[in-house]
Amino acid sequence: MSHHNIYLMVNGKRYSLEVESDRSLLDVVREDLNLTGIKKGCDKGDCGACTVLLNGKPVNSCMVLAVQADGKEITTIEGVARDGKLDPIQVAFIKHGAVQCGFCTPGMILTAWALLRENREPMREEIQKAISGNLCRCTGYVQIIDAIQSAARVSRVNNE
Amino acid sequence: MIGDFVVKGKYVGAEVDRVDAIGKVTGETKYADDLRLPNMHYGKILFSPYPRARVLHIDTRSAEALHGVRKIITAKDISGNNLYGYEIHHHPLLVGEGQETRFVGDSIALVVAETPEAADQALENIEVDYEVLTPLTSPREAKAEGAYQIHPGSQGNICCRPELIHGDIAAGFKNSEVIVEHTYFTSRQEQAFLETESGVAYVDDSGMLHIFSSLQDPYDVLEDVCYALGIPKSRIHVKGTIVGGAFGGKLITTIEVHLAAMVYLARVPVKIVLDREESFIFHPKRHPDEIHVKVGSTRDGKIQALEAEVLSDAGPYSGRTPEVLGLTVSALVGPYGIPSVHLTGQAIYTNNLDSGAMRGFGAPQAAVARESILDKLAGTLEMDPLELRQKNFLKPGQETLSPVLGDSPVSLELLKDQILEKMGPLPEVSPEQNKRVGRGFCFDMPVFDVSAIPVLGKSGVGIAVEIFSDASACVYAGGTELGQGITTVLAQIAAEELGLPINKVFVEMSDTWTCPRAGRTSASRLTYVLGNALLLATEKIRNTLLSRAAKMLEVSKDELILENGKIKAKGSPSKGVGLQEVATVCSNEGLKLREEGWFKYPEDRYMYGHTFMASAADVVVDLVTGEIKILKLVNIHDSGKVINPILAKGQLYGGSLQALGYALTENLIVEEGKLITPSFSEYLIPTAMDIPEEFVADAVETPYPTGPYGAKGLAEHALNSTTPAILNAISNAVDIDLTTIPVYPEHILEAIRAKETDHQ
Ligand code: FES
Ligand code: FES
């Protein structure tokens, strides 16, 4: 197995790493960087629990090789709260009961975060579509959708 | 009635934020796979490739020689019984040479290695010779005469055979003017929790084995580890980590016995995390059932008799099957008063995947058969299905069948009114669009465990609470946080009772070292049993604090109230003392500030309390494609006082969507004992695109006399009643009988075609 020297910008911090060519971004972030907030639900691209933002776009990090992410910017759930202050999406997830077991939550929040950057006023159907790759077995999604809508409202007010 | 019964509480009944939410939204919460120990190794399990085979020879030499491999373990290395299992210890930890495997989830060898990759390589290098044998893959075949016995000594491969008799069934059918009967087939449903089975363990310097894993019952794990490996119970500490979903799939011991064996024999800390396919194979699923049901009624719709036979695929091990099938059988009656009943079930061992607990514990299967046959009966009687149900609703004071307690105020009429109001008029679709709209109902009487005596002995369910001199408190509760929100519910109750702000109350859960025995986290039991135990414990602490404060304030104890971190005299608010001051004095004087509460239901037998649920669905069916769209889905639940409305709604939505999956997509297919659908791209659970256009969850709160604040259990309940509502809506839309779930578009088209051929 060949080794590669790569660097990743993760949550604004630069990491230089030596990785084997077949390792997934998910494994490298969880094991080598010890950022365990992202989860492994399937390792096959089916569940979205491993979602990170790669240059601002949500991806299933289990389906991305670490070497493919070389030089790119990555946001994990640990990078969403700024200066110890929760993002409005995180607050809304708590307030609306959008969290149960929490295993899907980090991925769900990152997907929502990317959505709200592109679409400040998403309709319910747009939210449903955006999060359709993030499985949640606990909540039935209703409170998650409520939370994302409410976070969008709060962010609009904050930005006005 | 909604919100009518409010014990005025600052926290109880309020929309309190989850106490464990911040860690979950920031990613800080540690699940089992997020834990790391110094010198931690990785454990992997070699599973049997065959559902039934005799292990002739296992050669581990080349695997052992690989770089990074610490230890390979086979049956001959195990010094204990090498067996585990809930109630019946017949599940081998490792199938050894000369023994037979019983399903593809049986373990042959364990690998401990420095890296997951080295462990995988070792798995590939273990050489096993098998004599492949023909498996039994259907209950009918397995119960037939002459079939080989999966557990030697059993007869007809019978795992259990519950029977429920009430009244005179022959007379019941004699009094019936109309009799309908039908057979229903339900699928094998996978819990599909997102966090696969995982755990870490190590042995400390004093020889104590510590297991941290994703589980539902730390006490059961402790029993199993002791039995299988011969480790004294006093040397085992089990701590349930925050669980990423379980839904019954982690109710029996999963990887913990394997983990303990690895740690003990390899003498290093070990982590096991199953991959998704292994998880789908490993834990028991919802039983696939064949239910034949026959119901007799008078012309005007008074049901006289109900007879049913359930044939259930138990898989290879007993586990929770007897409990689950027992509940399937009793849930066939549902919330109806039926004078004569004869219900039997048979769970048969097979070499298929294992069956066991999944949310609803067998009641969802029963509800499918019960509510479908009721609609069929309504059709035969040419009666409105809702009217038929209403005519047969359980009446206040009417007897329920054991083990269901009939001590809940009956609210079925109220639920019926509410659901009709919420549903409104049936939406119209113009006929030329080749679409048909239909509505279906289901009423249910889901249960929750109140007794737990057979599980825990006479002591009942324990909890401990401690208040510290800084006026912060900790609750030690042996239940497990699976996502359902029990941590928050207990914090709400403790804060309410101790007059503390909720951020001063901490809840430590699922730890056999610090928590009194509380039993399993299942059967929607924790709010009821732990809530009651908690009230007993906090009452003792309140007493201590109030008595001491009474002396300090020189007033009688009865005049004092405890709220907002203060103890105050009722009449003269100026007279008061801070809780912190009182707690400090108590602590300095050596008064007891840690108390236990033990709750047990007065009756010494296994039994369930119950809630009431009404569900209704509107669907539109496309006659050309068979496609089904759910326009509206409403669930209204009477689970007594709701301690936290946001959490309760979350349970209703979540359970209901699992039921939608059960109705329309979820089918874990096993052929010749092997899993055909090993991933989320083959086993389809609902996504956010699959939710009903309008999805409503609401509650009616009729207080339950013996519940904490009048509360009952509720977590599982929406799963029971949603599936039949959807099935009945489809049948209603296109006027067909549905007999098998999940219902795919092609089934609908077939049924429509069959009906047309019949009519020609
Ligand atoms: S773990 Fe990456 S999609 Fe499931
Ligand atoms: S909260 Fe459990 S999977 Fe979403």
Image: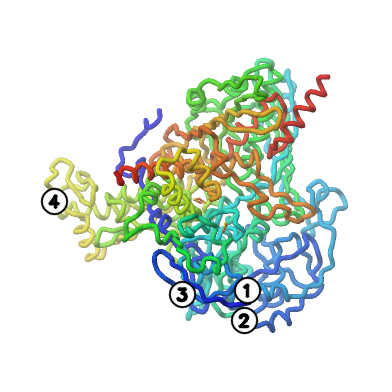
Question: Spatial distance from mark 4 to mark 3, Cα to Cα?
Answer: 69 Å
Residue B739 falls left or right of residue B453: right
Other-residue count near label 4 (Cα within 10 Å), few / some / many at <14 / 14–19 / ≥20: few
Q: Are marks 1 and 2 on the same chain?
A: yes
* Residue under numbered circle 4: B554
Task: State which mark lies toward you, 3 or 1.
Answer: 3
SS state under label 3? strand
Q: Amino acid at mark 2?
A: Gly
Q: Position of residue B282 (x, y in %)?
A: 66, 59
SS state under label 2? loop
Other-residue count near label 3 (Cα within 10 Å), few / some / many at <14 / 14–19 / ≥20: few
The foreground one among B9 and B29 is: B29
Question: Spatial distance from mark 1 to mark 2, Cα to Cα?
Answer: 9 Å
Question: Spatial distance from mark 2 to mark 4, Cα to Cα?
Answer: 72 Å
The foreground one among B127 and B576 is: B127
Q: Are marks 2 and 4 on the same chain?
A: yes
Q: Is residue B461 visible?
A: no
Task: State which mark lies toward you, 2 or 3.
Answer: 3
* Residue under numbered circle 2: B68
What is the residue that sits farthest to the front in this orientation? A71
| Chain letter of disc 4 in the image | B
Quick one: quadrant of the C terminus of chain B? top right
Say which residue appears at 67% left-offset and 30% top-offset: B372
* Residue under numbered circle 1: B117
Which of the 4 quarters of the picture holds residue A147? top left
Q: Are marks 3 and 1 on the same chain?
A: no
Q: Are marks 2 and 3 on the same chain?
A: no
Q: Position of residue B385 (x, y in %)?
A: 62, 22
| Chain letter of disc 1 in the image | B
The mark nearer the N terminus, 2 or 4, is 2
